[in-house]
Amino acid sequence: MTPKERMMAAVHREKPDRLPVTIHQWQQYHLDKYMNGMSDLDANRAVGLDASITFFRVEEAQSPDWRVETAQSSRPGYLERRFTITTPEGTLTTLEGSNAMTTWVIEHLVKRPEDIHLLAKYRPIPRFDRRGSLNAHEELGDDGILRTFLCGKQGGCWQDACELFGVENLIMASFDDPAWVHEFLGILLEQKLRYIEDNLKGLPLDLVETGGGAASNTVISPAIHRDFCLPYDRALHDALHAMGHKVVYHTCGGMMKILDLIVANGCDASETLSPGALGGDIFTDADALIVKAALQPHVAMIGGMDQVNILSKTADDIRKEVRRLFELYGSSGGYICSTSDHFFDTSRESLALFAQAARDCRY
């Protein structure tokens, strides 16, 4: 089988020739520091992984009613960007911090309940680089699968709202003013549905990622997830399925208490199967078997590898962990062994050992 055939067989909950193996996404920091600055596709090829390439390049649509000005300040190893957005009915501001590894929100864009109406009325829908995605698909060929995101800070509506308003603020609002939270989520849903309709028709995408860590049950309760995530997730997934796209739902955190809700949202695959050492709640083999029993009849599984603690160990440790994951999650097919999330200082040699260990797990 080619890497693409192998991975898509797993997405369809079938048995490929051997265990598919990949990483969640390659970060530029790691490519520059450990992979001689090569592309993510070449890095996968270099260490023998089945490539899972995420292409997400968008251009913010220009609008005289949504004018964005950017100011930045920096010091060694750190950058701040302040965005000031002017609309006919008011101004919004947000502040982001960045280092070599990642970017985060310091000041949230939505500060007052009425700010969401400026988003609804004036924020334009971004334009996806369709030509770029077609080029990425052609370059990838049969060496793996092509993924993308939805517009916004996060793919899911709840998760996006957390980035815009603050997770603690949104949790409190779900109790204090649930109608406002639903209005906020409805605005984001409508804009994401327009993004899907305007941008993703007819593209050869293998997986579209939705969700995000803020919907994990280590962040919110199953009850909040059921009320404020599930209906919006389902609407997004239905729209993507109507275009023929498959969906992977991302929960980089606890998932043991929301397995039924992950199934109910209609996704095709669930990631990241995060172990307890990485902030998830899958601590034991028994926990992993509970996850498999709940998910495998309905959705494929992606993830499980502790990229921080295991991939820094010996070759024998890596081989044993891959075999354990294969026997727990993958013995019946429908599983892609992958790092549970991003990594930054994992050696090239460890990644090659990871890939080889999976190639030894055959059906």
Image: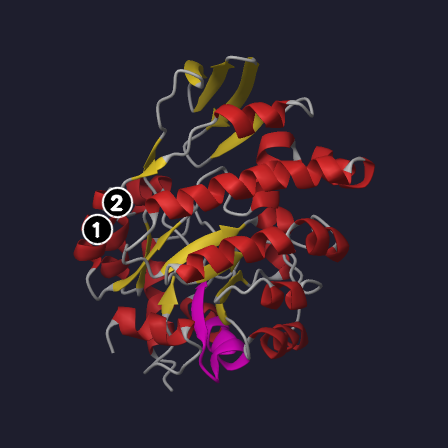
Residue 353 in the image, given as x and y percentages of width and height: 35, 66
Residue 338: image quadrant is bottom left
Residue 156 in the image, given as x and y percentages of width and height: 55, 47
Q: Is residue 332 magenta?
A: yes
**Residue closer to the observer: 160 or 320:** 160
Q: Residue at x 33, y 76 (%)?
A: 359
Label 2 crowd bin: few (<14), some (14–19), many (20+), radius 10 Å? some
What is the three-letter code of the residue carrying label 2? Arg
**What is the distance, in whole Å, between disc 2 and disc 1 at their CAs?**
6 Å
How many marks the image carries: the answer is 2
Q: As displayed, is residue 310 above or below residue 227?
A: below
What is the three-letter code of the residue carrying label 1? Leu
**Residue closer to the observer: 293 or 195:** 195
The residue beneath circle 2 is 130
Residue 319 in the image, given as x and y percentages of width and height: 43, 73
In this picture, residue 189 sits left or right of residue 209: right
SS at mark 1? helix
The residue beneath circle 1 is 134
Q: Residue at x 41, y 63 (%)?
A: 246
Visible in this render: residue 184? yes
* Quarter in which the C terminus is drawn: bottom left
Magenta extent: 321-339
Q: As displayed, is residue 337 above or below residue 23?
A: below
* Quarter in which the N terminus is drawn: bottom left
Residue 151: image quadrant is top left
